């Protein structure tokens, strides 16, 4: 039986993947390369390590072992993603637990700046808005650091979500039972407006944020004691039925020392009480800002469901930091890809198209490397590629 020898081809011509990775290529040019600080050189560079993790979130294999198998057996992954000499399972998982994640922090921050410069600015009349919330991550029982409750281990990731550009901007990682209110100072900057739910109500923090120039729009519990200083006029036919300058708290020890604004409005049969220091906006605009907090919940749901970020590859705090940073970097790359290629926001439709296009480019490069007309005519029929 005669064996056919196909012509040589190069995966470097995969235009779809190159377009997706282009922003990463640009920011890496300005970040110093990270070298091994020990006697043994890296089996893979930090850039290659990041490429592997990005590939994991795009293609989302079932596990770390499945990822290593893809890097060994899939032609595209072996040629375009993995190091030239391949990568051993032990070396990959050692990297997850030991590589310096500050390199990934620099990449994430650089991509955030690039996204902000490219993405359209929404709600500009409302200021620089950051929705803040936390999400729990299930950990294995042997992850002793992830303390949550008896016979349960969970980590908690705390995010600042840039509502103005619809991208995650900051995050911290703690044990599952850590107090989320203490993380706010790491997630928002002076001049920005933090949008938070009832759990973040803290009268001492309200005073602190005002003194530091951090704005806030925070839902509070309805039964909170309110001392009215001055009532503001209401707009006729508005859903807002309360607008006043107040102090909160029933005793001297737990009351706010700096007056703030409190509004209340109805959505259907549900009443919302919102504390804020935004005296420059109308009550209706304050209500609109709190409604935008839902954007971070949408992000959580989309990120978990479509990028496989909570299938934990490492049980250590260090490894989980690396995985979350890589997931955030992947999301930013997808955001920039959708914006640059389609002038759209990131969507699962475009992610699926990206996966199919990468597979199709590989298929066409392999079997029809010298026939662009054949490649063009066959491309529409290749929609069966793995998604």
Image (tube, rainbow, N blue to C red):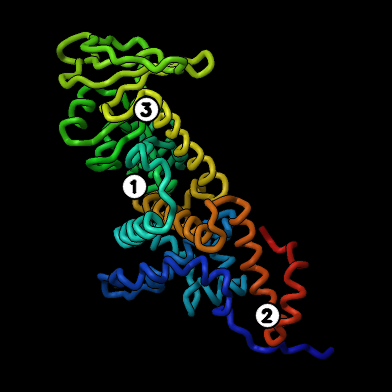
Q: Mark 2 sits on what residue?
A: 366
Which comes sooner in the sequence, label 3 or label 1? 1
The reply, left or right, for residue 158 in relation to residue 378 is left
Residues packed near mark 3 inside 10 Å, few (<14), some (14 to 19) or many (20 plus): many
Query: Which sits in the foreground, 160 or 165?
Result: 165
* Residue at the (39%, 39%) spot, across then down: 155
Q: Mark 3 sits on what residue?
A: 286
> Which tag is nearer the camera, tag 3 or tag 1?
3
Q: Distance between the residues labelled 3 and 2?
A: 57 Å
Which comes sooner in the sequence, label 3 or label 2? 3
Query: Is residue 318 visible in the rendered structure shown here?
Result: yes
Which quadrant of the figure has residue 12? bottom right
* Residue at the (32%, 35%) spot, across then down: 194
- Say if mark 2 contacts mark 1, CB within 8 Å: no
> Which tag is nearer the camera, tag 2 or tag 1?
1
* Residue at the (50%, 72%) spot, across then down: 82
Q: In which quarter of the image is the N terminus?
A: bottom right
Which quadrant of the figure has residue 214? top left
Residues packed near mark 2 inside 10 Å, few (<14), some (14 to 19) or many (20 plus): some
- The image's mark for residue 13 is none
Q: Mark 1 sits on what residue?
A: 170
Query: Which sits in the foreground, 194 or 279?
Result: 279
Element carrying mark 1:
strand
């Amino acid at each position: 039986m005669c064996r056919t020898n196909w012509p040589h081809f190069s995966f470097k011509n995969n235009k779809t993947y190159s377009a997706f990775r282009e922003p990463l290529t640009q920011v890496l040019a300005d970040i110093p390369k990270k070298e091994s600080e020990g006697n043994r050189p890296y089996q893979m560079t930090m850039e290659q390590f990041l490429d592997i993790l990005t590939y994991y979130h795009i293609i989302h294999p079932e596990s770390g072992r499945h990822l290593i198998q893809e890097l060994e057996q899939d032609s595209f992954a072996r040629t375009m993603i993995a190091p030239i000499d391949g990568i051993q399972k032990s070396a990959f998982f050692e990297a997850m637990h030991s590589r310096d994640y500050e390199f990934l922090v620099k990449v994430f921050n650089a991509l955030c700046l690039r996204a902000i410069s490219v993405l359209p600015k929404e709600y500009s009349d409302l200021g620089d808005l950051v929705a803040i919330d936390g999400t729990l991550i299930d950990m294995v029982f042997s992850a002793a650091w992830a303390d949550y409750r008896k016979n349960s281990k969970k980590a908690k990731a705390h995010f600042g979500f840039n509502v103005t550009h619809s991208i995650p901007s900051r995050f911290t990682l703690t044990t599952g039972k850590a107090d989320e209110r203490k993380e706010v100072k790491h997630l928002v900057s002076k001049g920005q407006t933090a949008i938070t739910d009832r759990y973040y109500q803290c009268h001492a923090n309200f005073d602190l944020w005002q003194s530091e120039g951090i704005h806030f729009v925070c839902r509070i519990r309805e039964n909170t004691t309110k001392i009215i200083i001055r009532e503001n006029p209401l707009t006729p036919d508005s859903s807002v039925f309360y607008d006043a300058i107040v102090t909160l708290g029933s005793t001297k020890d737990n009351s706010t020392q700096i007056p703030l604004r409190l509004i209340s409005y109805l959505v259907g049969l549900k009443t919302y009480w919102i504390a804020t220091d935004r005296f420059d906006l109308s009550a209706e605009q304050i209500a609109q800002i709190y409604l935008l907090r839902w954007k971070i919940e949408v992000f959580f749901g989309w990120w978990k469901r479509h990028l496989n970020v909570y299938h934990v590859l490492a049980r250590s705090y260090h490894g989980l930091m690396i995985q979350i940073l890589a997931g955030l970097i992947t999301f930013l790359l997808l955001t920039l890809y959708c914006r640059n290629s389609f002038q759209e926001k990131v969507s699962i439709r475009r992610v699926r198209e990206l996966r199919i296009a990468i597979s199709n480019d590989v298929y066409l490069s392999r079997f029809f490397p010298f026939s662009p007309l054949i490649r063009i005519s066959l491309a529409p029929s290749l929609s069966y590629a793995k998604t």
